[in-house]
Image (cartoon, helix red, strand yellow):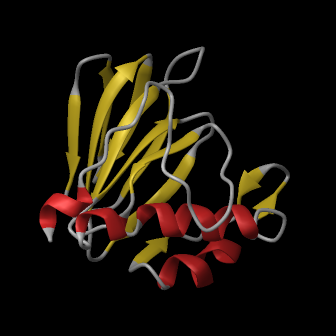
Amino acid sequence: MSKDRFILLDAGAARPGRIPVPPAFAVKARTEDTEGRFSLLEVVVAQEIPRHVHHEADEAIYVLAGELTVEFSDRVHTASAGQFVLLPHGVPHALRPGSTPPPRVLQISSPGGWECFVEDMIEARTEISTGGRLDPARLNPIAARYGIRYEETA
């Protein structure tokens, strides 16, 4: 029953997951909480997220603090606190911090699943990084399970 899915989190709290995640990823609503409709995370975008495409999910980002640089299609935008960005599925995009300290955002993925992808990335962090940065070629096998494809550079 829907009323059994009511969740009230205290300030700074996060939903427990399959594995512990770093504080930079505070899961507020898991996919299972929303019957698959969406997932919601509070994220500190501390490193560049390489250019990629979500083939199934739309991504919505609301900037809480700082500035987020968004590459969408062939354009670059800066979103600051209070601004909202909709990244529809099927369109290449990349994200990176545009401020120091790095931006803090609310990120909604619809349909859900983003928190599961984050957990999988954290489990494989040593295998998917080169020199402390995400390696798209190493990340793509995990991303493919979630309908995501990162652009690989030659």
Residue 2 vs residue 141, the one in the foreground = 2
Residue 10 vs residue 150, the one in the foreground = 10
What residue lies at 29% left-to-right and 76% top-to-bottom? 55
Instruction: Indicate the quadrant where residue 42 lies.
Output: top left
Residue sitting at the far left: 2
In the image, residue 130 above or below residue 14:
below
Relative side of 137 to 55, left or right: right
Q: Position of residue 119 (x, y in %)?
A: 61, 64
In the image, residue 117 above or below residue 49:
below
Do we see residue 31 in this rendering? yes
What residue lies at 64% left-to-right and 37% top-to-bottom? 23
In the image, residue 152 above or below residue 8:
below
Q: Quadrant of the C terminus?
A: bottom right
In the image, residue 28 above or below residue 83:
below
What residue lies at 35% left-to-right and 22% top-to-bottom? 64
Relative side of 2 to 39, left or right: left
Do we see residue 154 in this rendering? no
Relative side of 107 to 51, left or right: left
Instruction: Indicate the quadrant where residue 84 lies.
Output: top left
Relative side of 109 to 49, left or right: left
